[in-house]
Image: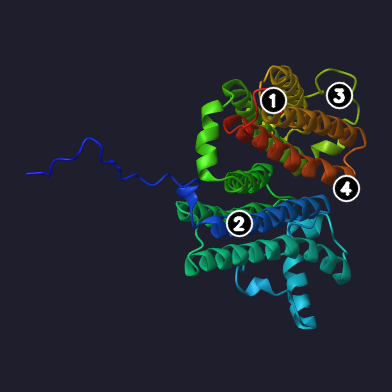
Amino acid sequence: MAEKRSIFEEVTETQKPAATPGALSAGRGRGRRFARAWLMVLFVMVVAMIAVGGLTRLTDSGLSITEWAPISGALPPLSDADWQAEFEAYQQTDEYRLQNAGMSRAEFQFIYGWEWGPRQLGRTGGLVWALGFAFMLATSRMPTGWSGRFVLLGGLGGLQGAIGWWMVHSGLQEGMLDVASYRLATHLGLAFLILSIIAWFVLRLSRDEAELMQARRNADGKIKGMSTGLLHLAFVQILLGALVAGIDAGRMFPDWPLMSGGFTPPDMWQIEPLWRNFFENAGTVQFIHRIVGYVLVAMAIGLLMAARKSANRSVKGAAQVAASMIFVQAVLGIVTVMHSSPLALALLHQLGAVVTIVLILRARFTAMHPFAQSVRGS
């Protein structure tokens, strides 16, 4: 039986220890910082691959390497005999016979370098991914719950290499002078998907998991929904831009806002069967690209109006920056078309698409996880 206490005896209770802030991700700070830095390196490499890939297409250098050699192809030809063998293989393609007949070997080496560059960047990116992933596993720096996401990222990178050859192989077929535009769109679309995933992962790793969970309670559903719609349509627009580049449609119809004096281009549906116009008719492809651009601008205006009513300054600012970039990208597209897509403007427009998609992702992420602010919004 328990001993009776005096009514004057001091009673002390065992207190539970207070919750430690940041316990959800305790001990993983170094891992999150390393993973974020690693992802940012991969992000820069993917942007470089997109830029060099665009230059490869614009300089008609994409069919100079006629075989897929993932391992041995890491080294360029090192001897005179190797260069001659590569040149002779290229001379068997229709691109050489019908478009570049009489090209010197020095000229071939120039375009070969433009195609070898993106392939080498892809190999290097795969190596950076593998080394970083292995390092995090070996040193226990893997952020909790992130290993599967990083494996997915590596798998998409490997798939991108295979799709790259699938794209190039289409241009080596009889009668082809360029790669198939829909395969080019698939290749570029996957590159932007990888880029977007990396950007989203960086945004998540930039803030503590406990903070993100707390911030979700104040999510701005309207801005999130509008930015999600913008994200999807911007991705479609990027695919359409690849179709435009694939058939050199950007170098035709340099007038704006009309096309050859009319709202629609002439002979929009002249190719049989009808569906081929969406991939092979320069006027049709560019017209659709223009219309989707107008819709994106209209949606950006709607996002700006909605952002003005947002109570959170971080959400408002992120949405306004994303909408403003859409306007800049639209103007840049118009200027590029009106100058028949010169190399510098076309590349700038492509890089503008990278900035646009990242800023839309940032606006969506901020709407989902607003930064805390005082009652007065400061």
**35 shown above or below 357:** below
Mark 1 vs mark 2: give the one in front.
1
Q: Quadrant of the N terminus?
A: top left
Residue occupying image coordinates x 72% and y 21%: 295
- Seen from the viewer's position, the closer of residues 369 and 152 is 369
- Label 4: how many Cα within 10 Å (few below 14, some 14–19, many 20+): some
Disc 1 on helix, strand or loop? loop
Residue that carries the numbered disc 4 in the rendered image: 343
Amino acid type of disc 3?
Met
Residue that carries the numbered disc 3 in the rendered image: 259
- Label 3: how many Cα within 10 Å (few below 14, some 14–19, many 20+): some
Label whose residue precedes the other's in the sequence (1 or 2): 2
- Label 1: how many Cα within 10 Å (few below 14, some 14–19, many 20+): few
Residue that carries the numbered disc 1 in the rendered image: 377
Q: In terms of image quadrants, where is residue 48?
A: bottom right
Percent from the top left, x then y, of residue 93? Answer: 73, 60
Mark 1 vs mark 4: give the one in front.
1
Q: In terms of image quadrants, where is residue 228?
A: top right
Disc 4 on helix, strand or loop? helix
Mark 1 vs mark 3: give the one in front.
1
Residue that carries the numbered disc 2 in the rendered image: 33
Q: In terms of image quadrants, where is residue 345?
A: top right
- Seen from the viewer's position, the closer of residues 99 and 313 is 313
Label whose residue precedes the other's in the sequence (4 or 2): 2
Task: Let me know if residue 276 appears in the view.
Answer: no
> What's the CA distance linking mark 1 and mark 4?
45 Å
Amino acid type of disc 2?
Arg
